[in-house]
Image (cartoon, helix red, strand yellow):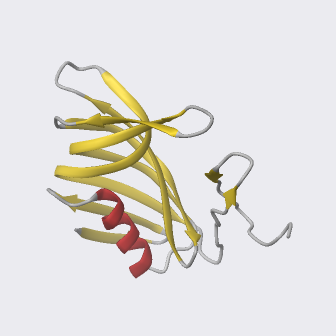
């Protein structure tokens, strides 16, 4: 992986075979990021799992053939002492049809280019909200406690 920084913005180049979530989590941990947005990403996934939230659980959809990443975005928060990465993606297959949703896991194919904006001095949380059964972004953890 290559990383460059300009001010509070980073550009990452992830390489073939890397686990997307491991790479972004490792980057966030190394840079001590506690609040950030994945502004966009492009590239290719060898394989991926997308999810659709049906109101009680994510319904997974496995993508077993390489797909172009035409959109990737999300947030990086801090939960349970570690980075918490939440991503959504739109992928184009060999038939030029798009599939998309909550990104559960992905393996980079050839490369992935990702832009991350950070919010220095802030911490975003991602506590479990039992009524929904989801970890939800909290922009000001502890403020309403």
Viewport quadrant of the N terminus: bottom left
The residue at the point 58 percent across, 75 percent down is 80
Query: How far across and how far down the image is residue 19, in percent?
Result: 26, 59
Query: How far across and how far down the image is residue 109, in percent?
Result: 16, 48
Q: Quadrant of residue 94?
A: top left
Relative to 118, residue 130 above or below: above
Q: Is residue 131 left or right of residue 60?
A: right
Query: How far across and how far down the image is residue 23, in percent?
Result: 31, 66
- Tell which residue pokes out farthest to the right in this image: 144
The residue at the point 57 percent across, 71 percent down is 78
The residue at the point 39 percent across, 81 percent down is 30
Relative to 71, residue 32 above or below: below
Q: Decide which of 121, 97 is in the foreground and name it.
A: 97
Q: Decide which of 59, 24 is in the foreground and name it.
A: 59
Q: Count all numbered tags in the image, as a single digit.
A: 0
Viewport quadrant of the C terminus: bottom right
Q: Is residue 21 left or right of residue 109?
A: right
Q: Decide which of 31, 55 is in the foreground and name it.
A: 55
Q: Quadrant of residue 81?
A: bottom right
Q: Quadrant of residue 101?
A: top left
Relative to 94, residue 62 above or below: below
Q: Is residue 36 left or right of residue 95?
A: right
Query: How far across and how far down the image is residue 72, in percent?
Result: 40, 44
């Amino acid at each position: 992986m290559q990383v460059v920084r300009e001010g509070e913005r980073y550009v990452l180049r992830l390489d073939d075979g890397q686990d997307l979530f491991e790479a972004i989590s490792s980057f966030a941990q190394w840079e001590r990021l506690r609040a950030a947005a994945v502004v966009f990403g492009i590239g290719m996934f060898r394989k991926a799992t997308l999810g659709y939230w049906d109101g009680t659980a994510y319904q997974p959809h496995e993508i077993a053939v390489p797909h172009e990443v035409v959109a990737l975005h999300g947030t990086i928060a801090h939960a349970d002492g570690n980075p918490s990465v939440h991503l959504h993606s739109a992928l184009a297959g060999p038939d030029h049809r798009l599939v998309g949703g909550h990104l559960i896991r992905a393996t980079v194919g050839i490369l992935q280019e990702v832009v991350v904006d950070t919010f220095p001095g802030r911490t975003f949380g991602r506590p479990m909200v039992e009524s929904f059964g989801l970890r939800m972004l909290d922009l000001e953890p502890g403020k309403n406690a």
